[in-house]
Image: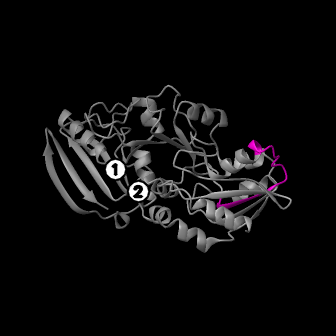
Amino acid sequence: MEPMELALLLAKKANPYPNPRVGAVIVKGKEVIGSGYHRKAGAPHAEVEAILDAEKNGANVKGATLYVSLEPCSHHSKRTPPCTELIIEKNISKVVYGMNDPNPLVSSRKVLQKAGIIVKGPVAEEKGRAMNKRYLENISKKPFVAIKMAMSADGKSATKTGDSKWISCAKSREFVARLRADYDAVMVGARTVIKDNPRLTARIPGAKNPIRVIVDGKLKIPLNSKVVQNGTIIVTTKQASLKKINAIKAAGADVFVCGEDRIDLKALIRSLSAMGIKKILIEGGSELNAGAVEAGIVDKFYIFIAPKIIGGVDAPGIIGGSGINNMKKARKVRGMKAKMIGADILIEFKV
């Protein structure tokens, strides 16, 4: 049996949903020296299993060829390092993969080629796609993304010093706690974590807590932040320190590198979709909100208007960024409705 056929056969052995089914085979000379597959979500990836299998059998994988049914990953996770790092570290000389991974965080070809590794693929795209229909459906469907913000009656989301506790009333905050429980993930920016050190939990007995997604381009959040724990994904760029990445992973959080010097929010939500995250609530500041709107990923807004006046030219609104130059370019909203939540007005609309 050809090595790629064996890798595909191994991939069929497990169902690591929402992760893809992947098998791997290592060949040196004409001999198969190691093989493995991704058994379940959270377990080592197929490439890791194959390398461990080879080494357990006393084989040296240096100079070998790795056949893997899906393009190797190149992103950081608390569970496993990027497979590309291990492939490079072990001096594997060639990688042949069956199917391109549509997850934008993967993109491993350039990483491997830069390290001097020969890369060939995709060589079995059709068979790989047939095996991973659920994974492909997951990643192709855009998650539902909503923004939740509170503002004063004069349109300010915080004072000029950044103080925002509390603009909304207690009943509005209770409503938000229930809202979080209805979403798969809550997303905030680094500034929110640094300023407020939130837990981002549902705070409702018996309710599931959403996955916490922290957008932090330069990885500035402190290691002792309440969100640096299991159930948190911290998204950064290639500008981040590898030492800080490893420290955050050691604390239990996942780290995704998603962009060169600015986080690519479109790519990020596609990657979150691949993980089975289908509803995302953004509770960030004005700049994260602006980035999400500019990226075209937002479906709905929840805006709480409190009976308070803040004032100040330097006090932020709910959407930052550069804005528009004339009203003709203003984004239209639809389905607007309003209701009272305690002393506040809640406005909901779709975009």
Q: Which amino acid does label 2 sit on?
A: Val
- Please name whichever residue, 65 or 199, is drawn nearer the observer in this view of the structure: 65
> What scheme was used to colour the molecule?
one colour
Q: What residue type is labelled 1?
A: Ile
Sooner in the amino-acid sequence: mark 1 or mark 2: 1
Residue that mark 2 sits on: 293
The residue depicted at 61 percent of the width and 49 percent of the height is 45
Q: Quadrant of the C terminus?
A: bottom left
- 10 Å crowding of disc 1: few (<14), some (14-19), many (20+): many
Relative to 289, residue 170 above or below: above
Q: Position of residue 69 (x, y in %)?
A: 64, 63
Q: What element carries label 1?
A: strand
Gap in Å between the C-alphas at discs 1 and 2? Answer: 9 Å
Q: In which quarter of the image is residue 304?
A: top left
- 10 Å crowding of disc 2: few (<14), some (14-19), many (20+): some
Residue located farthest toward the bottom when viewing the structure as drawn: 126
Badge 1 vs badge 2, beta-carbon distance below 8 Å: yes
Q: Where is residue 23 in the image (x, y as percent from the top left)?
A: 63, 58
- The answer, for residue 107, to whether it is visible in the render is no
Horizontally, residue 97 falls left or right of residue 334, namely right
The mark found on residue 147 in the picture is 1
The residue depicted at 71 percent of the width and 47 percent of the height is 53
Q: Is mark 2 on a helix, strand or loop?
A: helix
Q: Quadrant of residue 242?
A: top right
The residue depicted at 45 percent of the width and 52 percent of the height is 291
- Please name whichever residue, 235 or 37, is drawn nearer the observer in this view of the structure: 37
Horizontally, residue 218 falls left or right of residue 26, namely left
Horizontally, residue 345 falls left or right of residue 129, namely left
Q: In which quarter of the image is the N terminus?
A: bottom right
- The answer, for residue 321, to whether it is visible in the render is yes
Please state the extent of the stretch shown in magenta in the rendering: 55-71
Determine if the magenta segment contains residue 63: yes
